[in-house]
Image (spheres, rainbow, N blue to C red):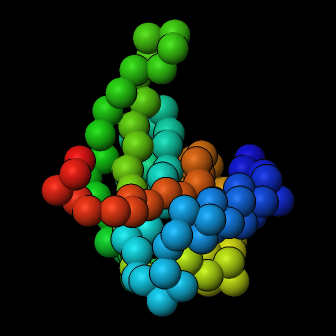
Amino acid sequence: MNDLEALLAQSDETVDVLIEAGLEADEELEIEHHLVSADFSKLEKAAVELVKLGYHVEDAEEFDLDDGQPAYYFAALTYCVADKAILAAQTREITEVANACSVEYDGWGTFIGDEEEE
């Protein structure tokens, strides 16, 4: 269901962009791993599995797909430095859970800079 190789490439590219943007190598970031499904019960199952693995899972939010159908998403949070090996391991772990629960893993993101600027 989820293309692990594409997700790993996206993860590495994101780390490269963060470093190029001037991120300090030892700066700890809040990482948000994004999971999506049109089936709330499948998404809920993925959330339970990720909590068991030590991730903090935010409440799911509903949104409409382009065709008007409802879907749901949540972020699974963790903290780490922008290290390709660490984030690749997390990407593999979350992809495995997403595939087992038949939900989409949309990769990870983070925020850099002063939160007051937002």
Residue 28 screen position, x and y as percent: 40, 82
> Does residue 45 appear to the left or right of 101 in the view shown?
left
- Residue under the image location 55 percent in, 77 percent down: 82
Residue 51 screen position, x and y as percent: 38, 74
| Closest to the observer, 44 or 10 | 10
- Residue under the image location 39 percent in, 37 percent down: 72
> Does residue 32 appear to the left or right of 108 in the view shown?
left
In the picture as drawn, the residue positioned furthest to the bottom comes out as 26
- Residue under the image location 49 percent in, 57 percent down: 109
Q: Is residue 49 above or below residue 85?
A: above
Q: Is residue 93 visible?
A: no
Residue 96 screen position, x and y as percent: 66, 67
Residue 60 screen position, x and y as percent: 30, 47
> Does residue 12 appear to the left or right of 53 in the view shown?
right
| Closest to the observer, 102 or 64 | 64
In the picture as drawn, the residue positioned furthest to the right comes out as 5
Q: Is residue 40 visible?
A: yes
Q: Is residue 67 above or below residue 22?
A: above
- In which image quadrant can residue 115 be found? bottom left
- In which image quadrant can residue 114 be found? bottom left
In the picture as drawn, the residue positioned furthest to the top comes out as 67
| Closest to the observer, 95 or 11 | 11
Q: Is residue 114 above or below residue 37?
A: below
